[in-house]
Amino acid sequence: MTTITVGQRLPLIGWSPSVAGLGRVEARRMLRHPAYWFGLAWLAFLSTNLTLDVIHGREEIWNAVYGGTMLGICLLYAPLTVISANRVAAATFRRRVREPLDVTPVDARQRTIGTILGLLRGPVLVGVAAMVIMSVVAPLTAPKAGDPANGIYGRGVLEHLQVPVLVLGAGLLGIALARWVPLPGALPLVVLILVEGTAGLYAPADANGVVHAPTWFAPWITWAAENAGLASDHPLGQEMWHLAYLLGLSVLAGVAALLRTPGRRSALWTTAAITVTVTALAGWQQLG
């Protein structure tokens, strides 16, 4: 049983040392969530196929490492983090576990902050590890001989910063949904609406590698979703504005989760207003 010590709360956001202890607990709960078991099975299958491709000479080893890490973290781990963070956040407000939690010195806002800290200390660190792996391997990747469109363009460290931010945004979305729509079946329904609603933004890069404007507004990493391989090189400035755009969406999801809890809201509304402005600016600037 984990003991959380009592600490003095700061009035604006409800922070206390108790929240830090809760964050450690929530990080472990998220990382151990069964949603990731499916991901591990799928990743093992993907790794086996990539290893066979390398052995048979159909793929360069570093391309396989880079591509496998990218697929695993961006197209699998991040979506599963929505489920993990949502279920952990929702569990603290279920009637069957509410009574034991009521004896701990944390209120609803502190519990939400603790869940966000757990996200940062758990799944987001996995995203950081993937970013490091991709950054180290990127200089060793190369397009396939005679088929550059289906090769690998290894991005730089700055571009790879989008990877942990994607995981962060996915987790904060899950937490916000747990606070605003705590109904059975609401999570898959909302995620399905989100996927279908943003799928229309995606448009494949043209023959010159130019990404169509609506694609930049999608809540994912643009170059990780391209179907023409990873050989396209986007201007670094656009990538950094897209990073700011993704980070802005993430912050808004976190603020939305906190607004659902009792307590002072003036600082949260101010943060939301500033974030909306910055996100809108980044969304416009990323078009190049």
Image: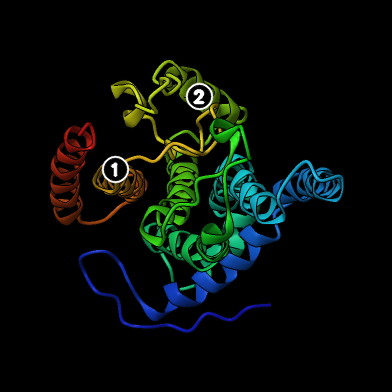
Mark 1 neighbour density, 10 Å: few (under 14) some (14–19) many (20 or more) = few
The answer for how far apart the CA atoms under marks 2 and 1 are is 26 Å
Vertical comparison of 163 with 192: above or below: below
Instruction: Report whether 241 appears left or right of 127.
Output: left
Instruction: Report whether 10 appears left or right of 62.
Output: left
Q: Position of residue 77 (x, y in %)?
A: 62, 48
Instruction: Report whether 140 appears left or right of 268.
Output: right
Marks 2 and 1 close (CB-CB < 8 Å): no
Which residue is rendered at x = 81% and y = 45% of the image? 57
State which quarter of the image contains the C terminus.
Answer: top left
Which residue is rendered at x = 30% and y = 67% of the image? 14
Which residue is rendered at x = 57% and y = 43% of the image? 143
Q: Position of residue 121 (x, y in %)?
A: 51, 68
Quadrant assignment, res 58: top right
Quadrant assignment, res 112: bottom left
Q: Which disc is residue 235 wearing?
A: 1
Is residue 207 among what the camera can see? yes
Vertical comparison of 281 with 165: above or below: above
Mark 2 neighbour density, 10 Å: few (under 14) some (14–19) many (20 or more) = few
Q: Position of residue 4 (x, y in %)?
A: 52, 80
Q: Amino acid at mark 2?
A: Val
Which residue is rendered at x = 81% and y = 43% of the image? 53
Instruction: Report whether 1 appears left or right of 19.
Output: right
Q: Which disc is residue 195 wearing?
A: 2
Q: Nearer the viewer, residue 177 or 191?
A: 191
Q: Amino acid at mark 1?
A: Pro
Q: Secondary structure at mark 1?
A: loop
